[in-house]
Image (spheres, rainbow, N blue to C red):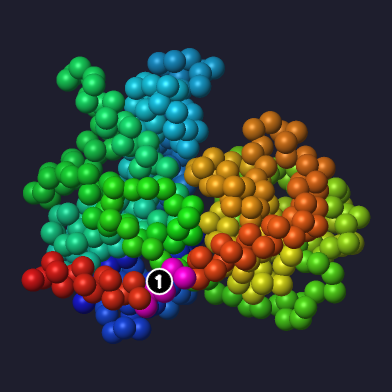
Amino acid sequence: MRVLFVVFPWRTHLQHMVPLAWALQSAGHEVRVASGPELTDAVTASGLPVVPVGSDEPVIAKVEREQGEMYQKLVEAHGEQNDILVDVCEDREEVLTWERLRWGSRFLAATSRASNDAMVEELVEYCRWWQPDLVLWDWLSHAGAIAATAVGVPHGRMRTELAVEDRARRLFLRMRQEQAPADREDPLGDWLGEWAEKFGAEFSEEMVTGQFTIEQMVGSMRLESQSPHLPLRYVSYNGPSVVPHWARRDPARRRVLATFGLSLAMDPATAASSLQQLQGMLDALADLDIELVMTLPERFQRELERVPDNTRMVEFVPLHAIVPSCSAVIHHGGVPGFLEAIAHGVPQLVIGRAMTDIGERGPRLERSGAGLWIRGDAPEDLDGERVREQLVRLLEEPSFREAAGRLGEELAAQPSPAEVVRDLERIVDRRRS
């Protein structure tokens, strides 16, 4: 069969799709990956064939423009000092008024337009020519759902983070029905419906959720969903990687990895920790008997005032090459670091709210006993002493490693990419018959 993966041009969203794409290709199926041109090099580096679609404008510029325009409308409606936009993980119905949910849906639609619109027309044109049997799309890449709907083929959504947006949308749709007919806007549904109508199709909620969802999150942490669910075991893929010499032997002291993904490099304003907070963390951990490995872009390394003797600064290290040797991992909540730590039974400390689902995933991590979460609602929450206090707990209390090991066993028991390939073959066969 022919399988088309669709992902908006963001590298980490591509990476979680690569192992399943490899498994499909190894099973003899034809695989293509469609994305914006700025992701072409990352796709080809994975060994997969790429179909560039859309414009060359960086996606982050599009998103910032769309969200900025929407935020200006919010300010005009409610003033500069407002709390209309709440944590997307908020699920207390007494707090989530119709006005809050409506503005949340408007922001989600604006982000989706910015991430997807440029890709849609070329993607539909390609699908009409290539005739895929199945479209698999990253959960923020609705262009895949639009194209699959336009050509009438099965499609599924791939998720790594918890589906907190799905829960918010279910409440939004329920409250929408209680509004007067003139007030029943649905920004996300209307946007998807406009594209569907353009290609002679109709909007359905499957364009939001997929006809089924493939999820890599460890099963005991995932949220309930109305979409059929295919669990998938996490398999590491960090892009082209070199294992450095220092990582090819056991560390002399307990090793701790501190990694904060692309957030600081790509958009410092949205990073989980500022450079000043990172300096405070380094200072607070300087006297611990550990080998601290911190990943940080070189230009930010140069801005640090001090690097302690127990710290090794690197720009990048493949997670799967270093996490197994670690006694703890500190990170910003990104799913690769989160699942890599679980896969190897390593306790973890999550810092801040950089990830949209962390308000749900952080507490679930703590309830599992496999790690801790520093919320960072106030700047002082992220000071170095707070990080030190929580890290020492992870290193000294055996219960954290025991709980992390149990989660790792659960994750390893989820179906492998090769097993999920057989599920996908059955889905396509049923559609054909």
Question: In x, y percent, where is residue 343?
Answer: 57, 67
List x then y, in percent, for residue 423: 28, 71
Q: Residues within 10 Å of mark 1 (few under 14, many from 20)?
A: some
Residues 352 and 7: in front is 352
Residue visible at 75% across and 33% down in the picture: 380
Q: Position of residue 319 (x, y in %)?
A: 62, 68
Please give the name of the residue rendered at 18% of the width and 40% of the height, measured from the top-left corner: 194
Q: Is residue 384 visible?
A: no
Q: Is residue 77 left or right of residue 186?
A: right
The answer to whether 42 is drawn above or below residue 77 in the figure is below
Residue 220, image x, y percentages = 48, 55
Vertical position of residue 19 compared to residue 62: above or below: below
**Magenta stretch containing residue 272, yes or no?**
no
Report the residue at 22% width, 26% height from top.
Answer: 177
Query: Which residue appears at 15% of the width and 55% of the height?
Result: 150
Q: Is residue 175 left or right of residue 42?
A: left
Identify residue for label 1: 415
Magenta residues (range): 413-418
Most frequent secondary structure within the magenta stretch:
loop
Residue 416 lies in the magenta stretch: yes
Question: Is 231 rendered above or below residue 418?
Answer: above
**Identity of the amino acid at label 1?**
Pro
